[in-house]
């Protein structure tokens, strides 16, 4: 089942928030400055963000002029095409094995759950998977991750609560090398992006990975809660400065009207949205697809 086969109903909130505003604009009238001002306001108020809105409007005006578009109704298809193009500017990573993926983010965004779902995906593709429980601060975090590991039939490396996360990652790296593991997934503790000491700890974990696993493809993914809207941009900015973010996992996209943030992220950062969370089940993590996303939010 494709992306919107699972979350079409949930995405209705985002679709209603964007389509209602845009459809009013795309019925009748000429393409004047007032039209573009209203379109900009509609995009920004739908969590598309000012940077992405500016980019889309600039490209839309150029396309309208080049293609001699004169009616508002014909603009919608052009806008959808430009949205897809904006999302596709940041290519989704192509995996090479052995592979290590570190998941980072603030508290409560669903990192541990995302690790479990990723483990399930890779196992279904026939890959061997080891999970590093490097969240040693949150009470019962390792226990929760163990449940996910069992569901996915993946190995897990964990230490006692309060242990050094770097030591957990070191041990997991040694285990992954000795067992020729295809994929190592690293769950990290949630940390506020304005806490310097915690961000330094994340840098330390990243250094351990690069030192111990030089032959692994190494990717850093940030997990974001779609319901936070524009606040997600600040999180990506700070985490990207610390460990160079390669991709984004967007959770709770099926339960928010703020799905326009996907375009805002594309307008601000080079890291693409790679996966979206569409539910609580172990298989409810879907590949992001730009065409399906745009078709899902604009009729």
Image (cartoon, rainbow, N blue to C red):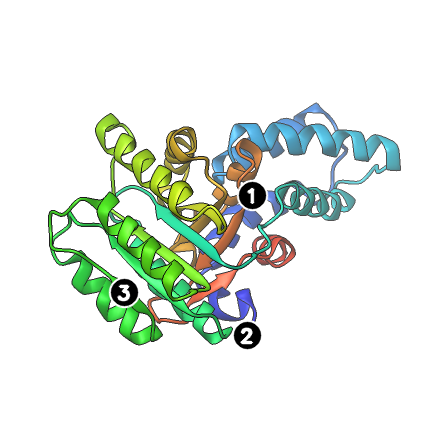
- In front of the other: label 3 or label 2? 3
Residue appearing at x 24%, y 51% in the figure: 168
Drawn side of residue 52 relative to residue 159, left or right: right
Q: Is residue 21 above or below residue 1?
A: above
Q: Which dot marks residue 21? A: 1
Is residue 110 visible in the rendered image? The answer is no
Q: Which mark is residue 1?
A: 2
Classify mark 3: helix, strand or loop.
strand
Which corner quadrant of the image does residue 236 belong to?
Answer: top left
Asked which secondary structure carries label 1, the reply is helix
- Describe the element under mark 2 as helix, strand or loop: loop
Q: Nearer the viewer, residue 48 or 31?
A: 48
Residue found at the far front of this picture: 178
* Residue at x 75%, y 44% (from the top left corner): 78
Occupied quadrant, residue 242: top left
Task: Name which of mark 1 and mark 2 comes first in the sequence.
Answer: 2
Vertical relation: 105 (above or below) 119: above
């Amino acid at each position: 089942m494709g992306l919107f086969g699972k979350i079409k109903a949930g995405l209705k909130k985002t679709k209603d928030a964007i389509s209602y505003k845009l459809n009013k604009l795309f019925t009748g009238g000429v393409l004047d400055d007032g039209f573009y001002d209203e379109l900009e306001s509609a995009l920004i108020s739908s969590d598309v963000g000012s940077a992405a809105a500016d980019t889309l409007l600039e490209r839309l005006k150029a396309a309208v002029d080049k293609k001699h578009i004169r009616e508002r109704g014909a603009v919608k298809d052009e806008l959808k095409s430009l949205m897809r193009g904006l999302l596709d500017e940041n290519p989704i990573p192509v995996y090479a094995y052995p592979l290590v993926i570190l998941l980072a983010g603030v508290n409560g965004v669903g990192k541990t759950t995302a690790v479990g779902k990723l483990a399930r995906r890779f196992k279904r593709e026939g890959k061997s998977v080891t999970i590093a429980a490097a969240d040693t601060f949150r009470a019962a975090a390792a226990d929760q991750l163990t449940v996910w590991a069992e569901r996915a039939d993946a190995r897990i490396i964990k230490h006692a609560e309060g242990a050094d996360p770097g030591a957990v990652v070191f041990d997991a790296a040694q285990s992954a090398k000795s067992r020729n593991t295809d994929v190592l997934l690293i769950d990290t503790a949630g940390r506020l992006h304005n806490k310097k000491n915690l961000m330094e700890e994340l840098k330390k974990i990243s250094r351990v990975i690069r030192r111990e696993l030089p032959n692994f493809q190494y990717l850093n993914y940030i997990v974001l809660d779609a319901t936070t809207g524009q606040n997600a941009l600040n999180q990506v900015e700070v985490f990207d400065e610390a460990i160079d973010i390669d991709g984004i996992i967007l959770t709770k996209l099926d339960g928010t009207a703020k799905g326009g943030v996907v375009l805002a992220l594309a307008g601000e950062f080079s890291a693409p949205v790679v996966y979206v969370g569409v539910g609580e089940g172990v298989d409810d993590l879907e590949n992001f697809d730009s065409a399906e996303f745009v078709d899902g939010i604009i009729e």
